């Protein structure tokens, strides 16, 4: 469906994404342990919202509506009702309409869609945020919380780390049917860590991961699953991070731009969107991401573009195999050819279609509710030349996002065009 009223990204902000492996993250072996605490959900969200208001210069009193993506605040920090938490970020928001959207790791993408829908329905200035705090629990306990994004009753028992195991199952299927190798996946992990090393906000900015380390299990990169059948197929380097963080951005209509006295040239326009959802209770083909394909092709159709027009992309690399299969789902590679695209360097920062330039979910980090807001903001920042050391060194006019909840279940895709 074409968008009924035009929506423009005016700017926004990320907090640093924090967690184990980040030099500022306080955990048991950190010198500050016991002296200082990691930022709370309230502090993290406030930092992103204040950052978005500062970046855009928008007077908070002029914001018409607010949306927030969050998956499981109730479990990690005993906090739900986050629409009201978002309103609590600024006294000028008091009484304004606000709501939380939840679609597992696509919660942020759903918040973006709610905002474009609100603009289509007449709103002019909308604030969109995404937040998740996940480091309050161990990775193993967090694995149980995150398993709520799967069919819990049926799939929880596959492993303590349910989602890593579900994607190990995809790697196993591809290894057996299409000759997928550790090297194919290692190219994606090494790219993620190399990009993150250039990104000051990235969770893994200080962790080196060479192609050789990512290609073999052992040492700091073990096969960690308890499920003996699946364990050999997944290493720590294949996984996204357990991160705390938030992103927020301001979306405006044409009338909103007039109200703010701003020009279109300050913005990037959301020119297409796609949203697709598959049943939680049925497993799809493990060798493809069919819901991602449907959502992305809906976004292409609504924008009137195809993969040949895309110059930069943010895809949902919750695991290396998810990025590889996304190459196929977005039309960059034919079925079974995702590995050769990964190996070719085409999606590297200096490649012809850079993907996940700030490190993706593996390198930048994956505070799950924030990811779907982080992605379009990253496309905007790349288009406006704001990415510092990881800036793509040529003009970018069309970008794509693909934000996936669960194991290819809820997917939101956006097509974004730079306004000049
Ligand atoms: N040798 C053998 N085993 C080891 C090991 C070693 N050297 N180091 C660790 N392990 C094993 C241990 O069993 C350990 O568990 P316990 O300490 O509880 O025994 C386990 O690996 C995890 O170790 P850590 O807790 O030390 O690992 P970590 O904190 O570095 O976490 C990770 C690594 C488990 C891969 C973690 O980063 C992770 O869980 N990542 C995935 C997060 C995730 O699933 N996110 C959701 C993605 S899915 C999505 O996006 C869609 C959606 O809707 C949910």
Image (tube, rainbow, N blue to C red):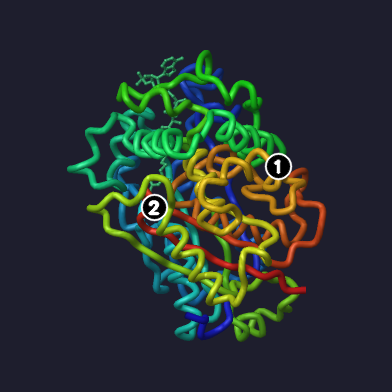
Q: Which residue is mark 1?
A: 345
Rendered residue at 53%/31% (across/down)? 181
Whether residue 39 is visible to the viewer of this picture, yes or no, is no
- Rendered position, 348 above or below 353: above
Q: Position of residue 214 (x, y in %)?
A: 58, 26
Q: Position of residue 274 (x, y in %)?
A: 47, 69
Task: Give whichever of 305, 35 is nearer the camera.
Answer: 305
Dividing the picture into quadrants, the one containing residue 161 is top left
Task: Give whichever of 351, 126 is nearer the camera.
Answer: 351
Rendered residue at 27%/45% (across/down)? 148
Q: Splitting the image into four quadrants, where does ligand 1 fall?
A: top left
Residue that sits furthest to the left in the current view: 153
Residue that sits furthest to the top in the current view: 219
- Rendered position, 413 above or below 178: below
Task: Give whichever of 401, 103 is nearer the camera.
Answer: 401
Q: Which residue is mark 2?
A: 408
Q: Position of residue 48 (x, y in %)?
A: 55, 53
């Amino acid at each position: 469906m074409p968008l009924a009223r035009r929506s423009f990204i005016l700017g926004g902000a990320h907090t640093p994404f924090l967690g184990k492996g980040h030099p500022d993250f306080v955990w048991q072996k950190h010198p500050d342990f016991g002296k200082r605490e990691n930022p709370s959900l309230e502090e993290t969200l406030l930092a992103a919202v204040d950052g978005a208001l500062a970046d855009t210069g928008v007077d908070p009193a002029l914001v018409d509506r607010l949306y927030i993506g969050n998956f499981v605040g109730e479990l990690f920090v005993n906090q739900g009702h986050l629409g009201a938490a978002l309103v609590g970020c600024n006294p000028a928001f008091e009484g304004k309409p606000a709501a939380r959207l939840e679609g597992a790791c696509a919660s942020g993408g759903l918040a973006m869609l709610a905002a474009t829908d609100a603009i289509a329905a007449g709103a002019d200035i909308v604030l969109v945020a995404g937040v998740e705090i996940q480091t309050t629990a161990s990775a193993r306990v967090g694995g149980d919380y995150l398993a709520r994004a799967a069919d819990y009753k049926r799939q929880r028992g596959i492993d303590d780390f349910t989602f890593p195991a579900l994607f190990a199952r995809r790697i196993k299927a591809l290894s057996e049917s299409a000759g997928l190798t550790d090297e194919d996946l290692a190219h994606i992990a090494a790219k993620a860590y190399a990009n993150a090393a250039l990104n000051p906000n990235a969770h893994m900015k200080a962790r080196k991961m060479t192609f050789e380390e990512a290609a073999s299990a052992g040492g700091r990169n073990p096969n960690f699953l308890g499920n003996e059948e699946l364990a050999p197929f997944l290493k720590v380097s294949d996984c996204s991070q357990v991160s705390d963080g938030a992103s927020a951005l301001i979306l405006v209509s044409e009338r909103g731009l007039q109200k703010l006295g701003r020009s279109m040239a300050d913005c990037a326009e959301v020119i297409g969107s796609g949203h697709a959802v598959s049943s939680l209770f049925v497993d799809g083909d493990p060798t493809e991401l069919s819901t991602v394909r449907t959502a992305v092709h809906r976004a292409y159709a609504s924008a009137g573009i195809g993969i040949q027009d895309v110059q930069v992309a943010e895809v949902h690399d919750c695991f290396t195999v998810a990025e590889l299969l996304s190459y196929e789902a977005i039309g960059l590679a034919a079925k079974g050819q995702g590995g050769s695209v990964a190996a070719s360097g085409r999606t590297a920062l200096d490649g012809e279609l850079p993907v996940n330039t700030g490190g993706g979910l593996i390198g930048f980090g994956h505070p799950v509710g924030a990811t779907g807001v982080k992605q379009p903001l990253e496309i905007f920042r790349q288009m406006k030349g704001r990415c510092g050391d990881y800036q793509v060194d040529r003009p970018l006019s069309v970008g794509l996002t693909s934000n996936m909840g669960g194991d290819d279940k809820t997917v939101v895709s956006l097509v974004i065009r730079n306004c000049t």
